[in-house]
Image (tube, coloured by chain):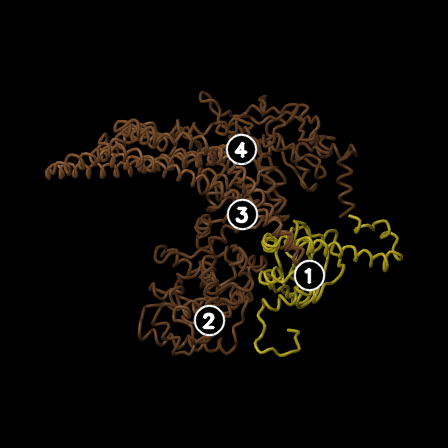
Amino acid sequence: MITKRPLIYWVKTSSVKLQVLLLGIIAVNIVARVFPLQMQRKIVNEAIGLKKINLLFLYCALYLAAVLIASGLKFAITAIQTYLGQETLSRLRKELYAHILTLPISFFRKASSGMVVSSLVTEVVSAGELVGQAIAVPVNNILTLLAFAGYMFYLNPLLAAISIGIYPIVIFVVPKLQKHSNIANKMRVDVTRDLSSKISETISGIHEVHGNASYRIENRKYGDFVDRLFKIRIVWNLYKQGIKALNNLFQNLGPFTLFVVGGYLAIQGRFDLGALVAFLSAYEKLYDPWKELMDFYQVYQDATTGYQRLMEYFDVAPEHAIEPPPDREPYELQGSIHTQDLSFAVAGGIQLLKQVNLDLKPGEQLALVGFSGSGKSTLAQCISQLYSYTGGSVLIDGKEVSQLTKKDLSHNMGIVAQSPYIFDGPIKENLCYSCEALLDDREADKQPKLPSLDEMIEVIQQVGLFVDVLRFGLNTVLVVDQKDELAAKIIRIRENFQDRFGGKLADYVEFFDETRYLNFSSVAANLTFGSPNREEFTQERLAENEYFLQFLDEAQLKRPLINLGRELATQFLDIFGDLPPDEVFFKESPIFVNELDDYKALMERIAHSRLHELSEQDQRLLLRLALRFIPGVHKMATLPEILRNLILEGRFLFMDKIQKDRPGALTFYRVSEYIYSQTILDNILFGKTTSDHPNAQDRINQSIIHLLIEEDLLERIVEIGMDFRVGTKGDRLSGGQRQKLAIARVFLKDPPILIMDEATSALDNASQKRIQTLLETKWKGKSTLISVVHRLDTIKGYDKVAVMKAGKILEMGPYQELLDKKGVLYELVHGAKAAA
Amino acid sequence: MNSSMEPKQPLSEYQENLEILIQLPLFAGLPIEPLKVLAYLCKRETFKPGELIFHEHEVDTNAYYILEGKGALVTETNGETEYTEFGEREFIGSISLFCDIKRLFTLRAKTKVICLTLSREKFQKVLERFPEISTKMVEAILMGVHAWEERFLREHVQACDDCRKRIGVSLV
């Protein structure tokens, strides 16, 4: 298991070829680094001393070559080191993530997702990078040190011994200092933590501070922490700097002894001058590798402790094997379920399930009912291996569930959780999620098939998601020209719609009408009243379009619109300026999520400026907002009556002007033309809906579906809707839609066992009934079903009903039988009726 | 709307919403920042006479403040029974902001009804940003339940024998 691996494992498993290559380069590099010293000596002694020009050039050339090679090799070393480090880092990230995903669900009850995120994102970094350095840095630097030291001994053993003699002292002293520094560092972390909790305490109690004017008390308490931190930080820094200073001192003491002893020897003529120069250079060159070793020592210390802490945190074994042994295919089970004295206890000895016995034949359907806390969900989760039961047994087709692999289960069981999770991506992808999970690395013919479009449409009809997906399709904006035949059909639908439903739906639709201001269209659309055929006339580009700006000036709209933009930005920032942005807040705002910071900066910049003082750039930024403004949607500002009339007048001026100056730049909204800048729905309506309330949507849907069927477009639009992206956590869907999607994806997988844990709790009555009927007709006898049920009126159709209380099954049998017995179920049903 | 002063520029819908929210007991005592966001996220809905605002047995995740018009609170199981009316300046459905509950009643528009609605989805987003407000709001709801039963005890229990056996909602 990954968490048991020591850090060295990652070094061992990194690319051997690269590590060997690295060592080879290091060896060459060391020669290339020592060589110039020898040249230095020869230049002084032989070339300069004996005044031989050609020798001087030769040695200098060799010197240069050696230096160039050394720098080149140094770069190669760093490159390989970086590659190894980053490669290990990504390996570490992937394998740790894979491990974390398999951890038991109970683990995630304790672990915060923030901790998991920071572990995978930041904490692994130092360990990964250390691995890159683990071989290269110590080997390179120790060898370099040895090489220079060796060279020094070769020049003069006595001098070498004297100058290197200092290092053992350093090696002895530094770790001791480091230990103190580590202690101080730990204290610093602790006190910093205290300090921040003190700060947040004071801030959240700020009204109390103001109320009591207790500033002195709070300042004193805070001051105490700061003073402690002050002392600790001084100690910590002194140790850190002390290590450096000591290191430097020893380093600088070297030349001192060299000059004293070497100088004396040179004067005596027992040591040549060139050798002394080389010696000094060699000694100075010792400094770099030594310093790198010291740094490495510190990085190594940090990384190993960090790595250990990280691995300790995730040191939990997965409860079940993921894959079956290689020689075995995943089981194909029939779906009989049998539990014998099943019990489940959590820490503290609390028994959530006590001796539960039940028996289901393949295709039988069981409803679990009971008060909340009675253990219904826990029972379902134990059977589906989400919890590991602590006693008794659960057998599926005679096989113990705890011994089955995750793959065995996923091939045979479909689970709809209480609050199902939907992942970011198109609807289609989410529908296929359970089926796609069954795919693996085997040959194509052994793989299960992914559902076809027809199957997907069938299942979304069954679960009642069809209209929703249709709606997503209708809200799509088509790409220009590509879907011409589709556009033609939509225009036909538009004509029929106007004829047949125009009057009835007038309350819910604002039709595009040349003579009226459109409250549910943007200011830009109100002015241009058309869809752009050229890039520079798209709504987003209008604020930079010189021609359009000139027109705004002419229509006397520029100044009032800039003012409107400013008003919008002011209001929006007043509400959301200091909040972390969230998609939901921006749905009805002319400012987009990614522009928030720009507009914050802009509003700060122009806080004290008058309109005429703004730069052209700032004016355009504000203008952009005003052009996006939709009075019926953006509720934080109003459109003054006078501006509304000016814009309406401006529309006609613009129409005249552009037809003369730039014919063809825009296509005006005409009943006979498809509007590519609008959604399919808006094209059919030839207008905008004025409410997204379900009542309004229902009426519009009903009329449109009818027309779509006539044109044979229904499935085409649904197919487009399947590409709708559901957003992170599916947050662009409603709770009901998420639940329907979760049920649909399990139905598509078509497993022999279905586990549904209050799977329809967020659905309206009609949808709930539809799914219940489906279970009773399509799935009965086909899949074994265990359904945790919260509403008693849906359980009549189940083969068996089990009533649970305090972790036990009190009674179990067919619905009518239990009622006739007048036992607990009878009480529950009648109690429920009495209360309603 | 109902303002007697003639402001220079008409208030935006958001500003009107904010003025309303500030006065509601449910939001009493909340700091202005979350109220601003809530006012921004509120939506106006119009219902025609006869239209259903919410429906018995169905999960409804909205709270409503009636700006204009009247709605009848009815149940439809075992034949239609009308219980009471809700009208202008009444606020209903705050529990829906916190949990999925199925409505026990249907609210049907008697006249044209304009409501300010706040959905749980949006409310929860505000809670994520301002978790501290939930305590105050739960308090306000519970106080409301308590006050309701207190009034009920005082005004009705004497007259109705059946009610006497059924009291105790404030003891939940």
Q: Chain of mark 1?
A: A
Rendering coords of residue A454 (x, y %): 46, 42
Residue B121 in the image: state x and y as whole percent. Answer: 59, 53
Residues indicated by labels 1 and 3 sit on the same polypeptide chain: yes
Give the mark nearer the N terminus: 1 vs 2. Answer: 1
Marks 1/2: CA–CA distance: 62 Å
Q: Nearer the viewer, mark 3 or mark 4?
A: 4
Distance in Å between CA atoms under marks 1 and 3: 59 Å
N-terminal of the pair, mark 4 or mark 1, is: 1
Q: Quadrant of residue A386?
A: top right
Q: Which chain is yellow?
A: B
Q: Residues within 10 Å of mark 2 (few under 14, many from 20)?
A: some
Image hue for chain A? brown
Tell me the CA gap for discs 2 and 4.
64 Å
Pointer 1 with pointer 3, Cβ within 8 A: no
Q: Name the residue carrying label 2.
A: A513
Q: Residues within 10 Å of mark 3 (few under 14, many from 20)?
A: many
- The amino acid on which the numbered mark 1 sits, given as a three-letter code, is Ala
Which residue position holds label 3? A465
